Amino acid sequence: MVTAPSRLSTTPSKPVGAELAPSSMLERQRTCVRSILERIAERSALEVEIGERRRSRDAAADADYHRTRTAQVEEIKRLELEEKDRDEKRRRSVIDAAIKGEAGAKAEFGSASRTIATHFDSHRDTAKADLNTAKSKAVAAHDSAQKQAARERAEKLKPLDEDAAHAEALRQRLAVVAADYQKLQINPELPPPAPESYERHAEPGDELFSRLSRMETPLRLLERLIIPKIMKGKREVWIYLVVALPFAAVAYTFGDMIGGGAGLIAGGTLGYLARTSIARLSKTQLERLYTPLTQSLADIDGLAAYARGQVEGRYREAKKRITEQREIELRKAQEAYRKTIKAGELHRDERLRKINEVYAEQMVEVQTKQQKGIRAALDEHERRTAEIRTLAETSLPRIDAEYRALKSAIKADFASEWQDTRKRWRNGMAAAAADLEAVADESRGYASAWDDPIWANRELPRRVPPVIRFGEITLDLEAIPGGVSSDPRP
């Protein structure tokens, strides 16, 4: 331990029975002590300087190492992040290009599909318009033919209706005759038509008109028969009056009341007989004309029914034929529409098949490019990753090796400097010890021997005293780091 320096002194200051040493000896001791103190101060300063230099160099090396390694690690991380970002961008560019290509292919396919659909819709609309036109024409032709058939039917039925009205008038007139002569038991019912072949008449209407015309004369004769008119209503009373009254008048003229009565009875009997004869004659005359007329009228009704049936049949046939023609036209229009739609669908499907093939090729091309791009991006990423890994595997160990080498150099420099300091310290202390030994050897002639009894209670001195006093300064050589015989370590 070193305290503030002052005057140098040794302990013990004066041995018992010793004389004072010469001044040259004292100066030599002081010089030796000063040399020791200088060596101590030098060693202390060198130890501090060497330690500080090592700590400074260690700190600088550590700081530089950590800075360099951290910078390298950060650089590697930056390169990894940049490569990751570039890899993501490369992948994204490939995917974006694929998406763009797919979108373009889809847009092209959609545009082509819409164009095909538009063309097909236009084709279908045209076909529908043609179908509707054909249907309208068929319906219009059907309606026109129906109207024409109806007009022809009306034209054919008009004379028949007129003949029917004429026949009804004749029937009414015959009914009047039958009613007027009901007492003669004239049958008012028409007999059934006589069997005949109506097909032999080319124009039944003309034959009907002829037959009706032929009935006019016999009917007028029937209506104008004189004898039957006597039997009409109560006119037959005149028969009794004309026959019975003359007999009664003659009998009353030539006889009495009984004779007149007998004449009246005889006249009544003759009147009854005359009335019966006239009634029979009237019936005969009437039936000779009435029966043929009723038969003719019945035949006319049959012919009229046949003629009307022919007209109605031809009308029904015409309607059926017109309806069938309409159905044929509608079927033709529908078939034409179906063929047109089928042809349009085949054309549409063929065009769709082609654009589907083009779309599939484009999609395969886009996917192939995407796979190649992704593969190239992966290869580039793996190459860059391998380069970064190689950089990390080479640069960091190189930095570590350089750091270890620098640390070893610092340690070696420190050890070398410490050995130099140690050598200087030992050489200086050895020189001081030699000087002190020489002074001690010289002082033995001036002081008591070391084996003198006065030193019996004292510790035997060493070659270099462990404690030296210089006035107020006490120097403990054993407390000095390294001492005279110590071996300092780094």
Image (cartoon, rainbow, N blue to C red):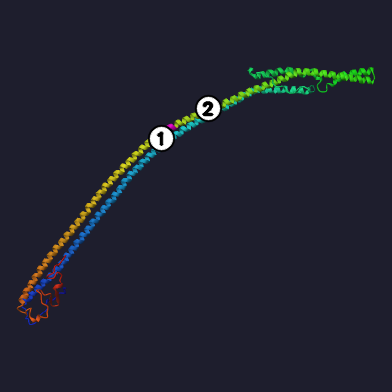
Name the chief secondary structure element in magenta: helix
* Residue 260: image location, x then y, percent: 92, 20
Q: Which residue is mark 2?
A: 329
* Residue 142: image location, x then y, percent: 56, 27
**In the orientation shown, which residue stands out farthest toward the front?**
195
Answer whether residue 242 is visible to the viewer in this image: no
* Residue 190: image location, x then y, percent: 72, 22
Q: Is residue 22 above or below residue 197?
A: below
Whether tag 2 and tag 1 are in contact, CB under 8 A, the answer is no
Answer whether residue 142 is visible to the viewer in this image: yes
Q: Which residue is mark 1?
A: 352
| Residue placed most toward the observer, 394 or 260 | 260
- Cα distance between the residues tagged 2 and 1: 34 Å
Q: Quadrant of residue 161?
A: top right
Ranked by sequence position, the earlier of labels 2 and 1 is 2
The magenta segment: 345-350
Reply yes or no: does residue 312 show up in magenta.
no
Image quadrant where one finds the N terminus: bottom left
Q: Residue at x 23, y 51 (%)?
A: 391
Q: Residue at x 39, y 34 (%)?
A: 354
Q: Is residue 16 above or below residue 136?
A: below
In the figure, is residue 70 to the left or right of 450? right
